[in-house]
Image (cartoon, helix red, strand yellow):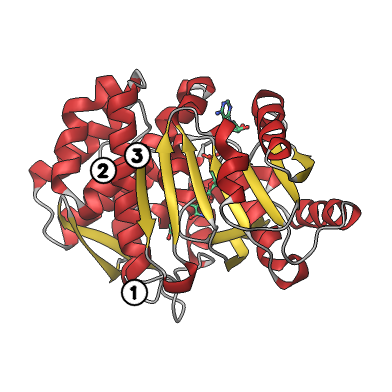
Amino acid sequence: MRTVEVPLGQRSYQIKIAPKLLPRLGVECRRLKLGARCAIITDSTVGPLYAKNALASLKEAGFDPALITVPAGETAKSIRNVERCYDQLAKHRLERKSFIVALGGGVVGDLAGFVAATYLRGIPFVQVPTTLLAQVDSSVGGKTGVNLKAGKNLVGAFHQPRLVLCDLDILRSLPQREFRAGLAEVIKYGIIYDTSLFARLERALPRLLRKQPAVLGSVIARCCEIKADVVGQDETESGLRAILNFGHTIGHALEAISSYGKYLHGEAISIGQVAAAKLSNALTGLPEADTKRITQLFKRAGLPTAVTLTAVQRKALFGAMRLDKKVSAGEVKFVLAQRIGKVVWGQRVPESEIVGVLTADGRR
Ligand code: NAD
Ligand code: GLY
């Protein structure tokens, strides 16, 4: 088993990465010395696959779990579902020492984390991420929240989990499109922080796409190490943590204007990262060769790298970007790369440059 520490003083926790971890959920929760009552929050796809095992493991370790199931998909990240979860927690009489288990992808993790952050002014929670994206990114670092019609993740809280369990076996049932979407966040870590991870991904991509356990385990662990390192230095995003948003300004806006339906999160940020790489080439000196390597890797991973927008859609995209949380004093700020492995944040980018880089051939 690989273990990564997230160093946050009293709120430090471990990320455990290995096959066959779900059956150990109860034993692992026992070690955290939490109350007996708990609730698993999952979605309508993951629940039927894994909730039975999770419930059995918790019961065997002496816990009294309830099961709360929300619909699968991005639209479940809503205030309405938050309220539904609160009602279920109250019905099951969860107390301050009770805890929530988030069993699912980033949607369930963000929703359940936000419910845990706010119910009774905050109760503990454990992340059991079931998508690649959630294992390498969303389950770590304590960002929780839900969407509004106006934009993604506009309501939320920082609330760190007490433990993250990444069971590699669970990824076997993940549809390949979702797995590829997770690779967009994996590639991001190479671009923002680790040249050798990027080069390794270029070599190991075919094995990764086959979900070969040894490669998968070590790549997930490296991504978690990078995230833990960044979050350990800047938990609430006053500076450095912004680098994790590489490609997300355009990506989130694309998701918002397509009503969270057309693109998976990973697909939208793939387009966003390729656009950010092209902007970096123009504005922060990212070499042409690095820009090509970045575009190529996303393409090889089977991810979209460009989008065609009508004038109306373009206007909506800029409107959505201005609503992004990363806007400061009305200005959209970008994370841009200087080379693969090194980025700078807080960069101003003229709107005319953005239009140019979104299409495949750079037409304005
Ligand atoms: P998701 O949670 O919607 O999961 C994708 C789909 O796969 C869902 O339909 C789900 O039911 C299904 N699924 C999940 N695990 C499965 C499995 N093992 N087998 C079969 N099907 C499975 O999407 P996601 O990509 O995991 O997460 C995207 C969300 O994460 C977005 O809302 C995004 O904003 C958020 N996010 C949050 C952070 C953060 O720091 N909090 C970081 C990145 C992304
Ligand atoms: N996924 C961005 C962050 O955790 O900060």
Q: Percent from the top left, x then y, of residue 80?
A: 80, 54
**Relative horizontal placement of residue 168, taking residue 97 as reference (left or right):** left
Q: Looking at the rendering, in which quadrant would you find the N terminus?
A: top left
The quadrant holding residue 67 is: top right
3D distance between C-alphas at marks 3 and 1: 24 Å
Disc 2 crowd, CA 10 A, few/some/many (<14, 14-19, 20+): some
**Helix, strand or loop for disc 2:** loop
Task: Name the residue that disc number 1 marks.
Answer: 239
Q: Is residue 257 visible?
A: no
Q: Percent from the top left, x then y, of residue 219?
A: 29, 37
**Circle nearer the viewer, 3 or 1:** 3
The quadrant holding residue 243 is: bottom left
Q: Is residue 283 above or below residue 128?
A: below
The quadrant holding residue 97 is: bottom right
Disc 1 crowd, CA 10 A, few/some/many (<14, 14-19, 20+): few
Give 237 or 332, whichever is nearer the viewer.
Answer: 237
**Relative horizontal placement of residue 344, taking residue 327 as reference (left or right):** left
Q: Residue at x 44, y 64 (%)?
A: 12
Mark closest to the chain's N terminus, 2 or 1:
1
Q: Is residue 200 above or below residue 274?
A: above
**Relative horizontal placement of residue 211, taking residue 79 as reference (left or right):** left
* Disc number for residue 220: 3
Q: Is residue 71 visible?
A: yes
Mark closest to the chain's N terminus, 3 or 2:
3
Q: Residue at x 62, y 65 (%)?
A: 156
* Disc number for residue 362: 2
Q: Is residue 352 above or below residue 60?
A: below
Outermost residue to the right: 91
**Circle nearer the viewer, 2 or 1:** 1
Mark closest to the chain's N terminus, 3 or 1:
3
